[in-house]
Amino acid sequence: MTRAPASRAIEHTPLWLKLSSYLVLSDEEKSYLSDLERTIVREPPRTDLLQQGERYRDVRIMRDGWAIRHKALPDGRRQVVNFVLPGDLIGMYCTLFESADHSVTTLTAVEVASFPPERIGELFRSFPRLAAALAWSGAREEAIVAERLLSLGRRTALERTAHLIVELLRRLSIVNMAADGHFVLPVTQEILADALGLSIVHINRTLRRLRDSGLIELNGQRITVNDVRQLASVGQFDELYLHLIRAPRRLERAFSGAPQHHNGTRPDGEDRPKA
């Protein structure tokens, strides 16, 4: 583990970019985010940032590099639950639970910021809009896991693989780590197999089908998606679960303290949505 110097300037970090895709952050909120990322360490590949069953310590923010969230059976069989990408948080729910129910292991060298759990409460008290954005991030993570469950239970090998590639492309685009269909995929076929519930042989065959069809190109760890729309069609990909939208107006109203009439109507004449 090596420590990196932290800059006092407000950086457009992956977390800043990710949360800004949901809410327009104020300068004060940006400064607070920057302060959360003040303590930075670098870790090599194959480092356990979190181990299943251990007590939570600090909350971590992935600034650079890739990791996996995974769970294992006593006999060592493993399921990759999700990929941890720049802008994602590790241990966000440490104030709610004492022990981790999954492990997080780095795939590449990573740069990670950390802050004590007590600051989560401080954030909710002093920066409720920012807390809402972090809650959105957590809810999106749950939605991604639910979508992965759908893939494992119902999608074919080809559909699972195509769906995952499009998902990673969309997630990386938010933090400016993918452009024009190009991104780095530092993931072995063994990891892909553990993520998609397939054998390595099946993964190899499926990637070859996608490449031979012209939908993707593979050059080492670099992948190019030649036709995102067609690949999304193959994977039956609907990005609704990623919630790549701005915060709804009602959320902004809630934080602005705008009054609301008891009959459910608002001062601007907009009715509350009916159940």
Image (cartoon, rainbow, N blue to C red):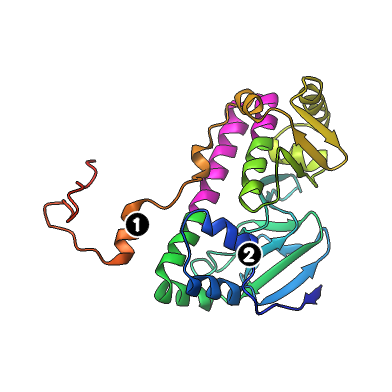
**Quick one: SS at disc 1?**
helix
Query: What residue is at 69 percent from the left and 27 percent from the top?
Result: 227
Magenta residues (range): 138-163
Q: Which residue is mark 1?
A: 251
Left or right? Give the position of 129 relative to 266. Answer: right
Residue 57 appears in the figure: no
Give amino acid for label 1. Answer: Leu
Residue 126 appears in the figure: yes
Query: What residue is at 59 percent from the left and 58 percent from the top?
Result: 17
- Report the quarter where the N terminus lies: bottom right
Question: Residue 153 lies in magenta, yes or no?
Answer: yes
Where's residue 179, x and y in %? 70, 43
Query: What residue is at 35 percent from the left and 59 percent from the top?
Result: 252
Inter-mark Cα distance, 1 to 2: 24 Å
Q: Residue furthest left?
A: 263
Q: Is residue 212 above or below residue 55?
A: above
Where's residue 254, x and y in %? 30, 61
Give amino acid for label 2. Answer: His
Where's residue 184, x and y in %? 78, 46
- Report the quarter where the C terminus lies: top left
Q: Is residue 3 above or below residue 210?
A: below
Left or right? Give the position of 116 relative to 161. Answer: left
Q: Residue furthest top?
A: 213
On the image, which quarter does residue 159 sit in? top right
Where's residue 196, x and y in %? 69, 36
Q: Which residue is mark 2?
A: 12
Q: Main secondary structure of the magenta part?
A: helix
Query: What residue is at 84 percent from the left and 43 percent from the top?
Result: 221
Task: Choose between 268 and 221: the one closer to the eye.
Answer: 268
Between disc 1 and disc 2, the foreground one is: 2
